[in-house]
Amino acid sequence: MRLLVDTDAGVDDALAILMALHAFPGDQVVGITTVFGNVDVHQANHNVAHILRAAGRSSIPVYSGASKAIVASVSEEKWAGHGPDGLGGESGKVEASLTAARRNEAVHALIDLAHKYSGELVIAAVGPLTNIALAMLLEPNLMSNVKQLVVMGGLSRGEGNHTPHAEFNVSCDPEATDIVYQHCSAKKLYVVPFETCLDNAVPWDTFDKIFHEQANSNGEYVKKIWKFTRSFCKDEGFFPCDAYAIAILLHPEYIKTAPVLKGRIHLAPDEKRGACIWDSDCPPEEANVTLVTEIDARVFVDLLHHLAA
């Protein structure tokens, strides 16, 4: 198996990347693609370099991706909990260059790597799906080469974290999410919605036991970047949304309930733009999403222990 992570490089993305690097040694992680979202794509490139340096894996290729939505985001508002730089203030805020924007390397990398590792490549998409959607539009048969696509994003119960009806990653680029759904089958596309992450939040006292003073360098890094963010979710607990996607990729047995559905996104320019629409009565051959609605939280806690030990 080969892994590619598509990320908008916030604090939960950092944990997801560290978990992936811990599980996939050597050259099994074939690349990281960046996308706008929690931060702009320039900052995302900087943050990924910071994460890889902390993990001692700076040799992994990083491909700069989309800087804006295909059509338009629902809102430009960002969650302040990621800090001014997306990593709780630890990587440092960088200003975008005044020179011409970098070519979107990510889309071409996705297509090329899927072809190179046909049948082996697993993609973990933990930011807006703009890069993935553009790759699918450019290469409609992309998913025939991809073994699995695991996405963190969307809603299962309609409990939005960005608008009352929309989850952040989807609301950044609703059209991209809809394009991805329409190019996939439920056999290959697994979606971890926001509510599943919230339902499986880890108590902060458990976090403190895992990421204690004797934790390894990974544990120290996680504790450091989450210090700022913690104050924004004191009551909810530790729920690093993107890391749950990596967890189910590593351990499918972690999934307890995952209905097979036909999904699409509400794209009209009204208050429900970005909402997920699920059809559970569709013919099996039309199902395009396996929606992970219930997981075993103990497995996730075990993975955190392994990362920090």
Image (cartoon, rainbow, N blue to C red):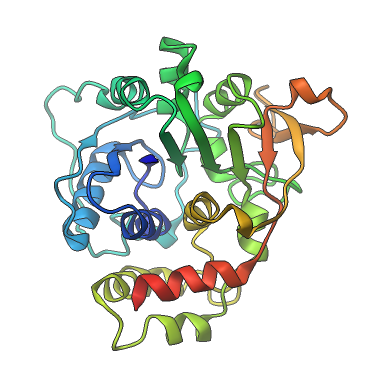
How many numbered marks have been drawn onto this rendered protein structure? Answer: 0
In percent of the image, x 47 and y 57: which residue is there?
243
Judged left or right of residue 288, residue 227 is: left
Residue 77 in view in this figure: yes
Seen from the viewer's position, the closer of residues 34 and 17 is: 17
Judged left or right of residue 56, residue 25 is: right
Quadrant of image for the N terminus: top left
Residue 23 position in % (x across, y down):
36, 57
Residue 77 position in % (x across, y down):
47, 45
In percent of the image, x 13 and y 30: which residue is there?
98
In percent of the image, x 18 and y 48: which residue is there?
94
Residue 69 in view in this figure: no
Seen from the viewer's position, the closer of residues 308 and 168 is: 308
Quadrant of image for the C terminus: bottom left
Residue 157 position in % (x across, y down):
76, 48
- Where on the picture, by quarter, is residue 237? bottom right
- Where on the picture, by quarter, is residue 69? top left
Given the current orientation, which residue lies at the most extreme right position? Answer: 281
Seen from the viewer's position, the closer of residues 72 and 57 is: 57
Q: 135 above or below 46?
A: above
Residue 112 position in % (x across, y down):
30, 20
In percent of the image, x 50 and y 25: which residue is there?
72
